[in-house]
Amino acid sequence: MIVVIGLVIAFVLVAIFSNRATRQCRWRRNAALDRDGFYWHCLQCGASVMTDTKEAPKLCHDPKSQ
């Protein structure tokens, strides 16, 4: 019973603290297209972004969602 309660609490905490702006985005870096920065492409929404850092974008850049 304690394990079930712990799992429920864990799922609630993940739902509260997850980043909703990129919940569905699946960013992949394409090193072949890196020129002046890092080229990222989202597999979920199809957005493409150039960034200055190696970290994936934190926000969704889908033109349909804006």
Image (cartoon, rainbow, N blue to C red):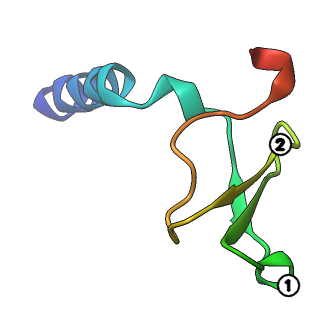
Q: Quadrant of residue 19?
A: top left
Counting residues from the N terminus, which is met first, the one under dot 1 or under dot 2? 1
Residue at 68%, 55% in the rendered image:
27
Find the residue positioned furthest to the left: 2
Q: Characterize the local packing of mark 1: few (<14), some (14-19) or many (20 or more) Cα atoms within 10 angstroms.
A: few
Of the numbered discs in the image, which one, if any, rests on residue 47?
2
Estimate the x, y position of residue 21 in percent, counting from the top left.
Answer: 55, 26
Estimate the x, y position of residue 63 in percent, counting from the top left.
Answer: 84, 25
Of the numbered discs in the image, which one, if any, rests on residue 61?
none
Q: Which residue is mark 1?
A: 32
Estimate the x, y position of residue 40 in percent, counting from the top left.
Answer: 73, 61
Q: Amino acid at mark 1?
A: Ala
Q: Amino acid at mark 2?
A: Ala
Q: Quadrant of the N terminus?
A: top left
In the displayed structure, 34 sits above or below 12; it is below
The answer to whether 13 appears left or right of 19 in the picture is left
Q: Nearer the viewer, residue 24 or 8?
A: 24
The answer to whether 42 appears left or right of 14 in the picture is right
Q: Characterize the local packing of mark 2: few (<14), some (14-19) or many (20 or more) Cα atoms within 10 angstroms.
A: some
Estimate the x, y position of residue 62 in percent, counting from the top left.
Answer: 79, 30
Q: Nearer the viewer, residue 5 or 44?
A: 44
Residue at 72%, 34% in the rendered image:
61
Find the residue positioned furthest to the front: 36
Q: Nearer the viewer, residue 26 or 37?
A: 37
